[in-house]
Image (cartoon, helix red, strand yellow):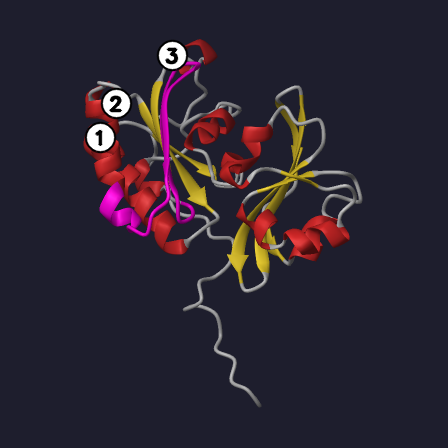
């Protein structure tokens, strides 16, 4: 099914859109409402309650009690497409796809790593966005910014922390994301003058997802039905079982 939104959008029109953005890429849940260039509302919650039990309630509370905006007023939806928690991504994407389909509004999937890196778009050194992928690995990409504009980005990969540091090519870099804290000691040993963010800046920001999305010529490049998670690696259930001695 072709998306009616798969076309280049006039920047003036795009900058006036009311967008609802969501990330459930990790344990915490980030939700934001953006109206044109203005951030109207952003909320981050991290609890033991599952995403499936809170996401719709968060959206309803935001629209009804926090910003006073009707769901019909939303022009489009943005969601973290991965990498990240397999279960978390499926829940967040399913919620946004459902809203997109029900409201007949466009949707955009944006990299979870973008939602980390674009919080530091004003950094004068490369930004290494790292998410803890467990099993001694991180989801990682290196971002180069110049005065808030993205200049270059490496491909998204799942590697060990040593390999992630090697991607900085020996240059000083800012390390952000849950992976940067999970392997901080290792990074300090391997990296050249590493800079670390505070842990409360490590999550994928729903507002930063919108910031990244706006760099595209085509904001909404897929229909809601076509939007799928990007896991980067296979789930534990899909990996071959290793039996000792074999």
Q: Are marks 2 and 1 in contact (CB under 8 Å)?
A: yes
Q: Which mark is residue 61?
A: 1
Q: Earlier in the sequence, mark 3 or mark 1?
A: 3
144 sits to left or right of 171: left
Q: Is residue 122 visible?
A: yes
Above/below status of 107 relative to 25:
above
Image quarter of residue 186: bottom right
Please state the extent of the stretch shown in magenta in the rendering: 25-54
Q: Which residue is mark 3?
A: 16
- Which residue is located at x 52 percent, y 56 percent? 133
The quadrant where residue 222 appears: top left
Give the number of the mark in front: 2 or 3: 2
Q: Residue furthest top?
A: 12
Determine the secondary structure under disc 2. Answer: helix
Q: Is residue 98 visible?
A: no
| Residue ID for mark 2 | 66
Q: Position of residue 193 (x, y in %)?
A: 77, 41
Q: Residues within 10 Å of mark 1 (few under 14, many from 20)?
A: few
Q: CA gap, disc 3 to disc 1?
A: 23 Å
User: Spatial distance from mark 2 to mark 3, Cα to Cα?
Assistant: 20 Å
The crowding category of the residue bearing disc 3, from other C-alpha atoms within 10 Å (few below 14, some 14 to 19, many at least 20), is some
**Where does the image place residue 188, in percent across and percent down from the top left?**
72, 50
Position of 118 relative to 88 (above/below) = above
Instruction: Using residue 174 as the reference point, say whether residue 43 is left or right of it.
Output: left
CA neighbours of label 2 inside 10 A, class few (<14), some (14 to 19), many (20+): few
């Amino acid at each position: 099914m072709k998306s009616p939104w798969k076309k280049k959008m006039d920047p003036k029109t795009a900058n006036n859109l009311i967008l609802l953005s969501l990330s459930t890429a990790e344990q915490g849940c980030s939700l934001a409402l953006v109206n044109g260039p203005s951030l109207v509302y952003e909320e981050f919650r991290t609890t033991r309650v599952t995403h499936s039990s809170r996401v719709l309630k968060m959206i309803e509370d935001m629209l009804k009690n926090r910003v006073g905006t009707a769901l019909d007023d939303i022009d489009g939806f943005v969601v973290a497409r991965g990498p990240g928690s397999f279960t978390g991504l499926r829940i967040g994407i399913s919620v946004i796809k459902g809203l997109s389909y029900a409201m007949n509004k466009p949707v955009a999937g944006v990299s979870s790593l973008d939602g980390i890196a674009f919080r530091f778009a004003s950094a004068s050194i490369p930004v290494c966005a790292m998410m803890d992928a467990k099993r001694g690995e991180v989801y990682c990409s290196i971002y180069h910014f110049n005065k808030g504009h993205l200049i270059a980005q490496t491909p998204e990969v799942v590697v060990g922390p040593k390999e992630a540091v090697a991607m900085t090519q020996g240059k000083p870099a800012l390390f952000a994301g849950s992976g940067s804290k999970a392997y901080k000691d290792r990074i300090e040993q391997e990296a050249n003058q590493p800079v670390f963010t505070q842990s409360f800046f490590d999550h994928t920001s729903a507002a930063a997802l919108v910031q990244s999305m706006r760099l595209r010529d085509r904001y909404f490049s897929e229909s809601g039905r076509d939007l799928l998670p990007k896991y980067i690696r296979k789930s534990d259930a899909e990996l071959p079982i290793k039996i000792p001695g074999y």
